[in-house]
């Protein structure tokens, strides 16, 4: 199973990925304070440990085909809306 997962992820893990976020910055600058709260999108507040815990759970379920109840963790412990408390 591990070798299968490594093989499937090799393309994504062996390359450098650069994302341009200028459109997101422009969008955020145009929003009212109310809209900024409703459509929260500030990745500086992501709790990355919790994010990757959920990511690992998803990889086990969707990539390795494990049943969700068999996978420990499952990304628990997130604060509301994924923001730092």
Image (cartoon, rainbow, N blue to C red):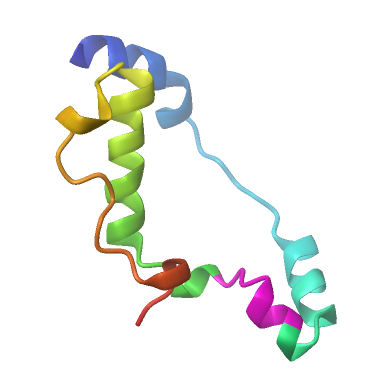
Residue 56 drawn at (x, y percent): 29, 38
Q: Residue furthest right?
A: 30
Residue 51 drawn at (x, y percent): 36, 55
Q: Nearer the viewer, residue 23 or 74?
A: 74
Q: Is residue 70 placed above or below 75 in the rendered structure?
A: above
Left of 5 or right of it: where is 35?
A: right
* Residue at 64%, 49% in the rendered image: 19
Q: Nearer the viewer, residue 67 or 29?
A: 67
* Residue at 35%, 71% in the rendered image: 79
Q: Which residues are magenta?
A: 35-42
Q: Is residue 82 placed above or below 59 in the rendered structure?
A: below
Q: Quadrant of the N terminus?
A: top left
Left of 48 or right of it: where is 24?
A: right
Residue 73 drawn at (x, y percent): 18, 46
User: How many numbered marks appear?
Assistant: 0
Q: Residue furthest front?
A: 69
Residue 28 drawn at (x, y percent): 75, 75
* Residue at 39%, 20% in the rendered image: 10
Q: Is residue 75 placed above or below 59 in the rendered structure?
A: below
* Residue at 34%, 30% in the rendered image: 59
Residue 23 in the magenta stretch? The answer is: no
Left of 29 or right of it: where is 47?
A: left
**Quadrant of the rendered image containing residue 17:** top right
Residue 39 in the magenta stretch? The answer is: yes
**Quadrant of the rendered image containing residue 63:** top left
Q: Quadrant of the C terminus?
A: bottom left
Q: Nearer the viewer, residue 79 or 50?
A: 79
């Amino acid at each position: 199973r591990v070798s299968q997962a490594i093989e499937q992820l090799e393309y994504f893990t062996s390359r450098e990925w650069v994302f341009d976020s200028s459109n997101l910055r422009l969008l955020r600058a145009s929003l009212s304070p109310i809209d900024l709260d409703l459509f929260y999108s500030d990745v500086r507040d992501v709790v990355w440990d919790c994010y990757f815990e959920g990511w690992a759970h998803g990889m086990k379920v969707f990539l390795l085909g494990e049943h969700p109840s068999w996978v420990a963790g499952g990304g628990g412990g997130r604060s509301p809306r994924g923001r730092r408390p």
